[in-house]
Image (cartoon, rainbow, N blue to C red):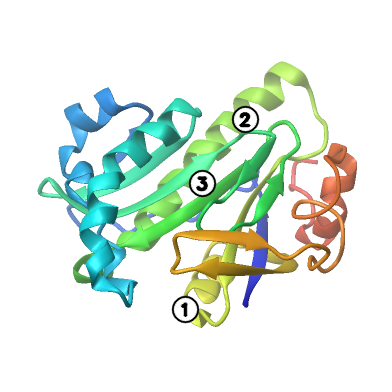
């Protein structure tokens, strides 16, 4: 049984600046053509598969990885990727679909219009000392922030959109990074059962507090904002 903290952050809050003078380059990938042109190393194999206890599965996961990437792009998902001298340093994936089911964790996220879900946040260990995790997270949040400014001007003021993610317990380093540095707040906890980090199932009625984003039917935007009152309002509001 896994327990996860669902974290949330207002998209219209400016993110902190990324690390400077690291040599890292940020890419925003939306298709396999983007991968081929900007970061072909992404298809060479999953850099995070070392966590598997059954190493025999690694070749299978590596063979499936390009198809998995293509499937994500076909659903409109986006990969923010950092490279150093052409090598993959870190990545984070983003979805803005109304209903997102994270296959590996089993968690289900119901998003209001304008919201986003970030997942599969990974930094290659040998590049972490450069701040590669912070670099790619800053890039993803900056992209969302800029888009929110465009949407705000074109649609008028309304409920602020939110970006969600989750952190498995125990992972104090990741929780510290997201909450202290990037201003996320824990909005919900939820449990799931998983098989070898390959496929998972969310435990019914395990979300606390109950309701969105990880339980119940699709909610209105106002209902989705209820757990986030502690995040405050923009200075311009």
Residue 33: image quadrant is top left
Q: How many labels does the image show?
A: 3
Looking at marks 1 and 2 on the same chain, the residue that comes earlier in the sequence is marked by: 2
122 sits to left or right of 220: left
Task: Report if the CB atoms under discs 1 and 3 are less than 8 Å apart.
Answer: no
In the foreground, 229 or 5: 5
Which residue is found at the position 50% from the left and 53% from the top?
119
Horizontal and vertical percent for residue 112?
A: 76, 36
Residue 77 in the image: above or below residue 202: above
Identify which residue, 15 or 113, lies in the foreground: 113
Q: Which mark is residue 141?
A: 3
Element on which disc 3 rests = helix
Would you name the residue on which mark 2 appears? 149
Q: Which mark is residue 173?
A: 1
x, y (%) of residue 138? 44, 52
Residue extending farthest top: 154
Disc 1 crowd rating (10 Å Cα; few below 14, some 14-19, many 20+) is few
Farthest left residue in view: 85
Q: How far apart are marks 1 and 2 (CA)?
A: 31 Å
């Amino acid at each position: 049984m896994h327990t996860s903290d669902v974290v949330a952050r207002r998209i219209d809050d400016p993110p902190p600046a990324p690390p400077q003078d690291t040599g890292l380059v940020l890419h925003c990938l939306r298709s396999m053509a983007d991968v081929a042109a900007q970061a072909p190393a992404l298809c060479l194999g999953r850099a995070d598969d070392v966590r598997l206890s059954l190493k025999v599965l690694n070749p299978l996961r590596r063979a499936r990885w390009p198809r998995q990437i293509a499937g994500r792009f076909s659903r409109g998902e986006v990969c923010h990727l950092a490279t150093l001298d052409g090598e993959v340093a870190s990545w984070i994936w983003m979805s803005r679909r109304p209903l997102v089911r994270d296959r590996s964790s089993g968690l289900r996220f119901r998003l209001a219009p304008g919201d986003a879900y970030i997942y599969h946040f990974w930094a290659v260990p040998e590049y972490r000392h450069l701040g590669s995790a912070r670099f790619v997270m800053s890039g993803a949040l900056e992209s969302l922030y800029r888009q929110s400014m465009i949407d705000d001007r074109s649609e008028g003021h309304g409920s602020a959109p939110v970006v969600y993610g989750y952190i498995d317990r125990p992972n104090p380093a990741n929780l510290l990074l997201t909450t202290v540095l990037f201003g996320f707040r824990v909005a919900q906890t939820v449990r799931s059962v998983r098989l070898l980090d390959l496929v998972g199932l969310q435990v019914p009625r395990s979300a606390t507090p109950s309701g969105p984003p990880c339980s119940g039917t699709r909610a209105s935007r106002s209902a989705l904002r209820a757990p986030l009152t502690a995040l405050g309002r923009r200075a311009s509001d």
